[in-house]
Image (spheres, rainbow, N blue to C red):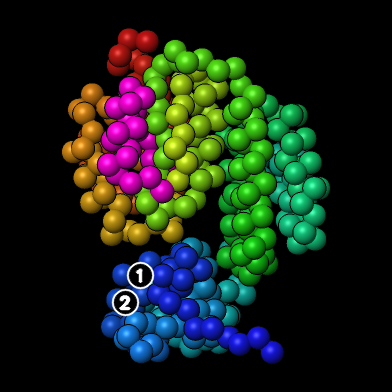
């Protein structure tokens, strides 16, 4: 039998999407989790506690408050997880069918079928509608299925990787315009590993005629500044997922804002940006539609 290895706090953060600071606060305030300690005094989390943390994160994503979740028993958490949240209506029968097909293909681990289904949908709809409508609906439905425990983490990762591969191919096939305006540098902060939202924004901005320079994920702040200067960027666009540390979002944005020239706009997008406070010199974009509106406003402002 394989030996069950206790996890470090960094591993638990990656596995659950719950930040290290949050884990420590819960430990002090609620008495859970209750990590062990290694010979150096570092926290080690038993697998059963990690399973519970995954469940708690799932329920938090459904809107449950952490204080309540941490004060009830494991059985009560399981009951909450079994209660399915309301399903958002699909925008069309084709979209509804694709969502169900995607979930079925993920559960049957049919990678080739998944890739084919996505590609056919994109070809039928066109890249703009596929990204702005279908991918948004797919992300929501796959996320809900994962939170309900209907998909495993590796199946959700498979979904993301297949979509990222398709969107990269689509971007590479678009006509390149080195003089497209504005010039938008896209990336994420260190420890933000989620790239799908970044690719979705890059697709839409490129379709609108902007020149997009993508650095991928997890770029140090100093390197973001260097890249913005080297590429003569008009805008630096960052993507935030809900897994990124809440405490770090605003301080890092403030820091980067100070590092960038005042002529370079700083945009913060993704679902997590919706909960950010207003920050001087930072444009918050909680939806892709907001990103397209910001692009239009930028062009009007500079007279494009």
The spot of residue 292 in percent (x, y) is 45, 28
Q: Residues within 10 Å of mark 1 (few under 14, many from 20)?
A: some
Q: Residues within 10 Å of mark 2 (few under 14, many from 20)?
A: some
Q: Which residue is mark 1?
A: 20
* Left or right: 22 in relation to 102: left
Describe the element under mark 1 as helix, strand or loop.
helix
Quadrant (top left/top right/bottom left/bottom right) for the N terminus:
bottom right
Query: Is residue 262 depicted above or below 147 in this figure?
Result: above
Q: Residue furthest front?
A: 39
Residue at image location 43% in from the left, 56% down from the top = 242
Residue at image location 52% in from the left, 24% down from the top = 206
Q: Which residue is mark 2?
A: 24
Residues tagged 1 and 2 counted as in contact (Cβ below 8 A): yes
Judging depth in this view, the residue of 230 and 251 nearest the camera is 230
Query: Is residue 115 depicted above or below 75 in this figure?
Result: above
Quadrant (top left/top right/bottom left/bottom right) for the C terminus:
top left
Residue at image location 29% in from the left, 27% down from the top = 229
The spot of residue 141 in percent (x, y) is 63, 53
Judging depth in this view, the residue of 45 and 53 nearest the camera is 45
> Magenta region: which residues?
218-240
């Amino acid at each position: 039998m394989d030996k069950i290895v206790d996890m470090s706090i960094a591993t638990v953060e990656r596995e659950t999407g719950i930040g290290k600071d949050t884990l420590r606060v819960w430990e002090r305030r609620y008495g859970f989790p209750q990590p062990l300690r290694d010979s150096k005094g570092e926290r080690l989390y038993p697998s059963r506690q990690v399973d519970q943390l995954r469940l708690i994160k799932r329920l938090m994503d459904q809107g449950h408050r952490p204080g309540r979740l941490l004060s009830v028993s494991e059985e009560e958490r399981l009951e909450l997880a079994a209660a399915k949240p309301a399903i958002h209506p699909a925008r069309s029968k084709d979209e509804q069918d694709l969502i169900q097909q995607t979930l079925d293909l993920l559960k049957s681990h049919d990678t080739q079928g998944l890739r084919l289904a996505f590609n056919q949908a994109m070809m039928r709809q066109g890249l703009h509608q596929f990204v702005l409508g279908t991918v948004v609906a797919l992300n929501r439905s796959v996320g809900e299925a994962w939170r309900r425990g209907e998909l495993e983490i590796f199946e959700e990762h498979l979904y993301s990787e297949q979509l990222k591969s398709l969107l990269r191919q689509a971007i590479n096939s678009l006509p390149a315009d080195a003089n497209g305006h504005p010039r938008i540098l896209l990336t994420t902060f260190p420890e933000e590993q989620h790239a799908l939202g970044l690719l979705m924004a890059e697709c839409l901005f490129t379709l609108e005629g902007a020149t997009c320079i993508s650095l991928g994920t997890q770029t140090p702040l100093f390197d973001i500044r260097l890249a913005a200067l080297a590429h003569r960027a008009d805008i630096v666009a960052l993507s935030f997922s809900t897994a990124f540390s809440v405490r770090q979002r605003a301080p890092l944005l403030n820091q980067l804002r100070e590092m960038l020239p005042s002529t370079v706009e700083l945009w913060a997008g993704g679902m997590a940006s919706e909960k950010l406070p207003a920050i001087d010199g930072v444009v918050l974009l909680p939806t892709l539609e907001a990103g397209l509106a910001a692009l239009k406003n930028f062009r009007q402002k500079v007279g494009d």
